[in-house]
Image: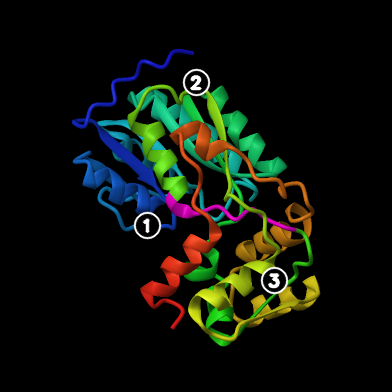
Amino acid sequence: MTDNTNNSNASTKLILGGTGKTGRRVVRRLEERGVPVRVGSRSGEPPFDWKDRSTWKAVLDGVDAVYMAYYPDLTVPGAAEDIGAFGAAAVEAGADRVVLLSGRGEDEAKVAEQALKDAGAEWTVLRASWFAQNFSEDYLLDGVLAGEVAVPAGDVPEPFADADDIADVAVAALTEDGHVGRTYEITGRRALTFAEAVAEIAEASGRKIHFTSVPADGYAAALKEHGVPDEVSELLLYLFTTVLDGRNARPADGVRRALGREPRDFADFARDTAASGVWS
């Protein structure tokens, strides 16, 4: 597989999931570089929907590279088929370079990765661990603000990945040579238990925040009570009860391999987020 795609600033990059945690960061970085960007979303122009393949051709028009962040996760039924089909459509449209956000330690996600490879794309895979930003921009934020993070997690450590690092690697893979055919496992510098992560957030924010480990069935009931969609609830339970078993406990070198620097530390994330006022 060659790595000679022309990635000049005049070529449009398509960011699928461009309003999400990593996608909007990728969009911002590309725009700051003067790279034309198209955000792929149902509210975009033209609109894009993973489940409506009639929207795919228009969103790929004039694009030379794609960042794929699949919602809600590559582990859900049908994800691999969608990834493979869109990868083939991208190659046919001339958008040969595809960067796929994947999940570290998720066997089902590897099936989606292979589907992209089989489509003939010039692929780069970013296998990310649990996002640090889940504490500030997603389902763990309410617990932080309430003073108690209650999830079915015990003493298994996780090297939380910073979404800014993921975005930096994605932009490099979209715009630079040397990343085609590579899989980067993206993690933070240190592995922390959820209790340790919450303690660092409490220290950075100057607030009293406790961590409580709860049974999985009780957590599932709480998610249902709060109206969380079934597919999202099932994903969270899968991550907590299956993936969070120690398989991802060791930090990886993906950020260093891709960018030549160390990943952001969780303490830096906690300090900067606290300064932003999100946890106030």
Q: Position of residue 246 (x, y in %)?
A: 78, 51
Q: Residue at x 60, y 56 (%)?
A: 160
User: Magenta segment range?
Assistant: 157-164
Residue at 44% x, 13% y is 2
Q: Callout 2: helix, strand or loop?
A: loop
- The crowding category of the residue bearing disc 1, from other C-alpha atoms within 10 Å (few below 14, some 14 to 19, many at least 20), is some
Mark pair 2, 1: CA separation:
27 Å
Indicate whether residue 104 is drawn in magenta. Answer: no
Label 3: which secondary element? helix
Extreme residue in the top direction? 2
Nearer the camera: disc 3 or disc 2: 3
Task: Name the amino acid, label 1.
Answer: Thr
Q: Circle 2 sits on which residue?
A: 120
Q: From the image, tell me which residue sits under label 1.
A: 19
The local crowd at label 3, few if under 14, some if 14 to 19, many if 20 or more residues have their Cα within 10 Å, is many
Give the residue number, with chain letter if any, for mark 3. 195
Quadrant in which the C terminus appears: bottom left
User: Measuring 46% from the left and 48% from the top, which residue is drawn there?
Assistant: 165
Magenta stretch: helix, strand or loop mostly: loop
Residue 17 in view of the camera: yes
- The mark closer to the camera, 2 or 1, is 1
Q: Position of residue 166 (x, y in %)?
A: 47, 46
